[in-house]
Amino acid sequence: MKRYWTMYLCLLFALSACGTQPSPSESGATAENTTAQEENTGSDEDTETEQNEEIESNTETEEASQGGNSPESQENNQQLTEDEDKKQQVFQDGTYERISHTSGGLLDIQDNGDQAFSFEIHVSEGANVGHLSGNAKMNEDFQATYQGPDSCSLTFEWKDSNILVSSSDDCKYYSGNGVTFDGVFYGEGHAEEVEPDTLSSLGVLTDEQEDLFKAMVGDEYELFLSTFHLIQGEEIIDSFDGGAYSAKVQGLPGMMEGILIHGHGDALWAAIIDEEKVKYYSNNEILVPETIEDWTKEFTEFSHVLMPEELSFEQKGTLPTFEEEQAAEVPTEEVLEEEVLEEEVPAEQEPAASWEGAWLVDGSSDIGGSLTISNEDDAGFTFDIHVSNTHAGSVEGYAVKDGSTALQSADEIGCQMSFVKEGNSITTTEGSECWQWSGAGIHLNHTFVK
């Protein structure tokens, strides 16, 4: 029992030794170390917080920089790139052509920059021309605009390597009668996009008649095509049915004119001014119909030949039948007496009745108009003509009378209108310089009635 208590005491002593409290100095050091550790722990926490904030900031910056790689951003960037490429491709330097058998034109573009280019444009309508040059500014819609000092403006629109030009009314000052700057000007290599004009596309012939006509006139087909600019229908005064069209080039009346008739079946006739000749063509026994012969009365100063062999014009006319030949060889006594009377008693020209009054276009065409004659005396009268359809023309002046005819005293541009009075109608014919008083697609040759 004693031994047990001894062991118990020893155990208590050992336990007491293990739980001994530290000295004051040791306790103070321990407290300082604990405080320092706590301070270090707080500093580490602050540093870690700052590092986390910096990482988050860098992450946000990286995400923002990578935002351009999003589908929406990529699409916007691609669109910007395409727009920049297109700006570099539109309105490229070079020459562009407006293609027509009567209304040609050239547009030259130079010094194309990011926002502007310089241009020079030449256009024509028949023999009349127009010209304009300047600088055009481009906008965001891939268009460009020229604004002149006098309200004339041109708009250029890029259309698949071609340029569509539109002009304001004030630009007419820079062009002749009937001439416009409007139209599509084709870039290099794009001219084949335009179907060439033909007499059938102009509505004068059918496709089948076109082939027959080309065979009849041969190499002169291009002359007919270039002459058929201002086209108008003609009345056929012959005994057959069909269609007749006369034409002339704007600005060149009396120099480039022609007429074409198609009759029953495959019958075709035509006449054309070629320099100082009037050439006649026919593919049937009627060499020169009366309708064409009447048309050629205005061109007496030219020599007249039958084609293609250029036969003498004395061979013209309808080939007579056998009965007509017999009748022509044996004239009756009655016919002879009438011929003698006509030779002995020349007809006297009766003075024309009064010209004065208001006369209207006879209504045989789609053109409306009026002829007003006033201040008539024995010598002459003053007149005022106005005609219109989609275009308009007018002329006024003083005409000197000569029986049933009258001739205008030449005005400031050399225009001389002629007048023929027959009963209750007056027919006007414009002189070579009078075209300047009428618009494109219209003329002053009309019959007026009361």
Image (cartoon, rainbow, N blue to C red):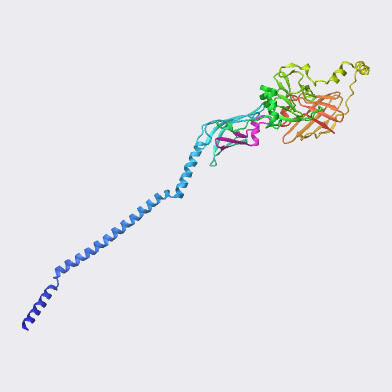
Image: magenta residue range: 156-185
Residue, x 42% and y 50% (percent of image)? 67
Q: Is residue 336 left or right of residue 1?
A: right
Q: Residue furthest left?
A: 2
Whether residue 173 appears in magenta in the rendering, the answer is: yes
| The one of 208 and 428 positioned closer to us in this rendering | 208
Residue 4 sits above or below residue 393 on the image: below
User: Where is residue 136 shown, x and y percent of the image?
Assistant: 56, 35
In the rendered image, which quarter is residue 195 located in? top right
Residue 137: % across, % down: 54, 37
Tally of numbered discs: 0
Quadrant holding the N terminus: bottom left
| Relative depth, front residue between 27 and 309 | 309
Answer left or right for 449 relative to 228. right
Task: Verify whether residue 383 appears in magenta.
Answer: no
Name the spot of residue 228 as percent of width and height, x first: 70, 28
Q: Quadrant of the C terminus?
A: top right
On the rendered structure, is 125 left or right of 118?
right
Residue 410 appears in which quarter of the rendering? top right
